[in-house]
């Protein structure tokens, strides 16, 4: 469950500096996400370490810089 991540898909939104700053201020880490911030979760879920995790159902992994906890 990613938060706001600066990617080409949301270039229209990320071209507004005030909106980008507002979104960053709403996170616990004080910045918006980058594609690299999702890499660790992707590697975990795609690799052998996830053999048991993939059988957990009904869970969401929040990778949002603390936005959901803020």
Image: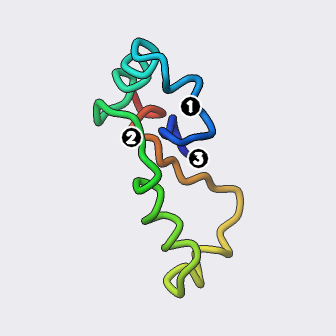
Q: Disc 1 or disc 3, which is closer to the eye?
A: 1
Residue occupying the far bottom of the picture: 48
Q: What's the distance in space between the residues labelled 2 and 1, CA to CA?
A: 20 Å
Residue position for label 3: 1
Mark 1: few/some/many CA within 10 Å (<14, 14-19, 20+):
few
| In-front residue for pair 34/28 | 34
What is the CA distance from the residue labelled 1 to the residue labelled 3? 20 Å
Q: Earlier in the sequence, mark 3 or mark 2?
A: 3
Eye-nearest disc, 2 or 1 = 1
- Residue indicated by mark 1: 11
Q: Say what secondary structure mark 3 lies in.
A: loop
Q: Position of residue 9 (x, y in %)?
A: 63, 39
Q: Earlier in the sequence, mark 1 or mark 3?
A: 3
Q: From mark 3 to mark 2, how far is it between C-alphas?
A: 11 Å
Q: Is residue 49 above or below residue 15?
A: below
Q: Is residue 49 left or right of residue 21?
A: right
Say which residue appears at 52% left-offset and 38% top-offset: 3
- The residue at 42%/46% (across/down) is 34
Image coordinates for residue 48, horizontal then vertical, percent: 53, 87
Assign a secondary structure to mark 2: loop
- Residue 60 placement (x, y as % from top left): 61, 52
- The way the protein has been coloured in the rendering is rainbow
Query: Which comes before the other along the chain, label 2 or label 1?
Result: 1
Relative to 65, does residue 45 appear above or below in the rendering? below
**In this picture, residue 65 sits left or right of residue 49:** left
Q: Is residue 35 above or below residue 56?
A: above
Q: Which mark is residue 65?
A: 2
Dots 2, 1 in contact, CB < 8 A: no
Tell me: residue 20, above or below residue 2.
above
Please name the residue shown 40% across and 17% down the image.
17
């Amino acid at each position: 469950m990613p938060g706001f991540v600066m990617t080409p898909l949301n270039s229209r939104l990320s071209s507004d500096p005030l909106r980008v700053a507002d979104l960053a201020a709403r996170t616990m880490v004080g910045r918006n996400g980058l594609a690299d911030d999702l890499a660790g979760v992707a590697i975990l879920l795609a690799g052998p370490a996830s053999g048991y995790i993939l059988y957990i159902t009904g869970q969401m992994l929040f990778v949002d810089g603390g936005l959901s906890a803020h």
